Image (tube, helix red, strand yellow):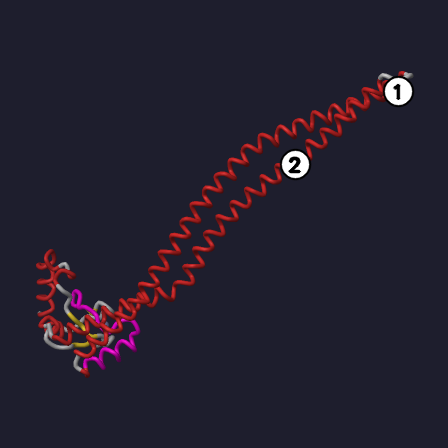
Amino acid sequence: MHPDLERVVRLQRIEDAAERARRTIADEPARQEALAAALDAARQALETQRALLAENQTARRDAEKELAVQQARLSKYRDQLMEVKTNREYQALQKEIEVAQQEIRKQEDALLERMIEFDEVRERVRAAEEAFERDRAAFDAGREALAAEVAGAGEAIGTLAAERAAVAAELSPPVLALFERVLRHRRTSAVAPLRDGRCAACQVRIRPQTVQEIRRNDSVVQCESCQRILYLEAPAAEGAAADAGASGAASARLQE
Ligand SMILES: [Zn+2]
């Protein structure tokens, strides 16, 4: 392979790695936010269950209070029943006693309902607490992993800059200038592999004469359409072992 061609491919790999590292750093706030939002959702779910439990206990205390009030009324009416003198008074008190008894049954039912509900809600609170602990552990682990990733990306940017400078220094100035011009213009890549007789970046079919030039791998050739520097991928990357016959046929067709 032409040494400059090999270097521009290396330079592009360095650019790609640097771009990934820059993106990791740029994405950090959004990923932090997503982690915090997931933890918030878990915390809210727990708070909802805790509020339901508090509501249940308030309702239970209210029922207990009302039950005590009705029981006091009932015993008062029963005491009064001993002292009535007329049948009318007796019947009126009996009526009051019935009402109080009905009210007592109602409050006893409500109390039982709250007690059953309490067990269920307490179980849901316990489950929500467990889920929250798991989510908090996941949050801590996620934040740690993210911090490590960002720190790694920061270090990589420094290392890659040094590597890039070393490769750029070896590259002949016109080819380096060409690489940088195309990279600026195309933003993400200044090189493209030749695949099935096409530029893998813009998919334009490359003229047979140019394909042969690229296959010789001994000069810097640009795609006529996107201007990227074209190169032949390593046989392993192209899967040439399996496709040797097919690519041979393709190049044969191109040569016609
Ligand atoms: Zn192209």
The residue that label 1 is drawn on is 89
Residue at 50 percent across and 48 percent down: it is 43
Q: Is residue 202 visible?
A: no
Mark 2 is on which residue type?
Ala
Label 1 vs 2, first from the N-terminus: 2
The residue that label 2 is drawn on is 59
Q: Position of residue 7 (x, y in %)?
A: 17, 73
Most extreme residue toward the bottom, as rendered?
A: 174
Is residue 196 rendered magenta in the image?
yes
Q: Position of residue 155 (x, y in %)?
A: 30, 67
In the picture, measured across the screen, residue 98 lies left or right of residue 31, that is right
Residue at 13 percent across and 64 percent down: it is 234
SS class, disc 2: helix
Up-down relation of residue 46 to residue 11 (above or below): above
* Distance (Cα) linking label 1 and label 2: 36 Å
Residues rendered magenta in the picture? 175-197
Res 170 → quadrant: bottom left
